Image (tube, helix red, strand yellow):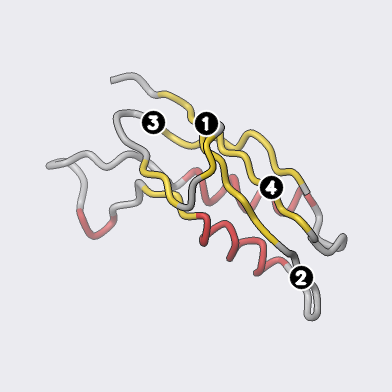
Amino acid sequence: KSVVLKDVDITITGLTPSVQLATLTNAVKNHLYNIRPFIDGGDDLNTRNDKLYEADLYKIVRDLLQAGETFTTLNMNVSGVSVDVYTFENGNIPKLNTITV
């Protein structure tokens, strides 16, 4: 099967301005790079990494904050649909489209 890029859009509200968008973008891209469809019979179940969790993105943002800094909400959309978790299957892989703060 061919590879299909699925746009991932992230919206963050109430983000403290000290977090650099470039730093945040790089951290998210690095995370997305490792998410790939699981190939049954070909991939190891112990290293399965085909799901993108909104909670993981939340943690990435939180880890970039300095003491006392916060954000209010984080929302993840995959191909225009708001989701908490998305499983990449059948050659679909994530591609960061936008981060809106």
Rounded to the nearest whole Å, what is the CA distance between mark 4 and mark 2?
14 Å
Q: Amino acid at mark 4?
A: Thr
Which residue is located at x 68 percent, y 37 percent? 98
Residue 94, image x, y percentages: 48, 37
Give the residue number, with chain letter if any, for mark 2.
70
Question: Which mark identifies residue 79?
Answer: 1
Three-letter code, disc 3: Asn
The part of the image, by quadrant, that contains residue 58 is bottom right
Q: Earlier in the sequence, mark 1 or mark 4?
A: 4
Q: Residue furthest front?
A: 82
x and y, in percent, of residue 19 in the image: 80, 60
Give the label on residue 92, or none.
Answer: 3
Q: Are discs 2 and 3 less than 8 Å apart at CB?
A: no
Q: Amino acid at mark 2?
A: Thr
Helix, strand, or loop for circle 2? loop
Q: Which residue is mark 4?
A: 11
Q: Residue at x 38, y 49 (%)?
A: 51
Cα distance in 3D space between marks 3 and 4: 22 Å
Residue drawn 56% across and 41% down?
77
Amino acid beneath label 1: Ser
Q: Earlier in the sequence, mark 4 or mark 2?
A: 4
Q: Left or right of 54: which side holds 38? A: left
Give the Cα distance between marks 2 and 3: 33 Å
Percent position of residue 31, x then y:
52, 51
